[in-house]
Image: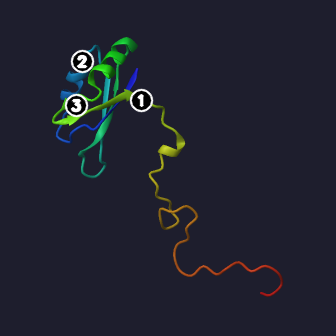
């Protein structure tokens, strides 16, 4: 079972989070998401627990619990969709869809008055 963990304090370590979940059962994988540039935790991650019953107990037992002075948000991880992978930036010059690279956009003319 893949579990989402949110609201993790930036000073937390993978070993601390893993130990927290191991109180409920076996943890086979942990992936805390970090910023590409600063390498600081972004505040969320994913835990893999092979036994679904242990995973469900971990979710029930840890959701809302204080960990490093912050209440954790723990739930079943949702599958990643295409709309979650972009980040909002497009190469056309801005983060708005269909934006141009700047400058004056002439209005489209219709008919024969070019």
Q: Nearer the viewer, mark 3 or mark 2?
A: 2
- Please indicate whether residue 50 sits to the left or right of residue 86 in the image: left
Q: CA distance from mark 3 to mark 2?
A: 12 Å
Alpha carbon distance from label 1 to label 3: 18 Å
Q: Residues within 10 Å of mark 1 (few under 14, many from 20)?
A: some
Tag 2 residue: 22
- Which quadrant would the C terminus be assigned to in this image? bottom right
Left or right, residue 90 beside residue 57:
right
Residue drawn 23% across and 46% down?
Answer: 40
Which residue appears farthest toward the front when viewing the image? Answer: 64
| Residue 69 placement, left or right of 113 | left
SS under mark 2? helix
The residue carrying mark 1 is: 77
Quarter residue 28 falls in = top left
Tell me which corner region of the image, top left, top right, bottom left or bottom right, holds residue 18: top left
**Above or below, 9 relative to 62:** below
Number of other residues with Cα within 10 Å of mark 2, as a class: few under 14, some 14 to 19, many 20 or more:
some
* Circle 1/circle 2 CB separation < 8 Å: no
Q: Specify which label sits upstream in the sequence, 1 or 3.
A: 3
Name the spot of residue 36 as percent of width and height, x first.
31, 49
Pointer 3 or 2: first along the chain: 3
* Number of on-image labels: 3
For marks 1 and 2, the one nearer the N-term is: 2
The N terminus lies in quadrant: top left
Which residue corresponds to mark 3?
14
Residue 88: image location, x then y, percent: 46, 55
Q: Residue 14's spot in the image, x, y percent?
A: 22, 31
Q: Determine whether the residue tagged by mark 3 lies in a helix, strand or loop.
A: helix
Secondary structure at badge 1 equals loop
Disc 1 from disc 2: Cα separation: 18 Å
């Amino acid at each position: 079972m893949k579990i989402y963990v949110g609201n993790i304090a930036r000073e937390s370590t993978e070993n601390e989070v893993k130990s927290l979940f191991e109180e409920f059962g076996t943890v086979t994988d942990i992936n805390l998401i970090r910023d590409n540039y600063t390498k600081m935790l972004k505040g969320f991650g994913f835990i893999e627990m092979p036994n679904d019953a242990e995973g469900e107990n971990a979710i029930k037992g840890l959701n809302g619990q204080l960990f490093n002075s912050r209440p954790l948000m723990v739930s079943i991880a949702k599958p990643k969709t295409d709309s979650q992978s972009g980040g909002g930036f497009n190469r056309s010059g801005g983060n708005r869809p269909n934006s141009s690279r700047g400058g004056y956009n002439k209005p489209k003319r219709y008919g024969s008055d070019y």
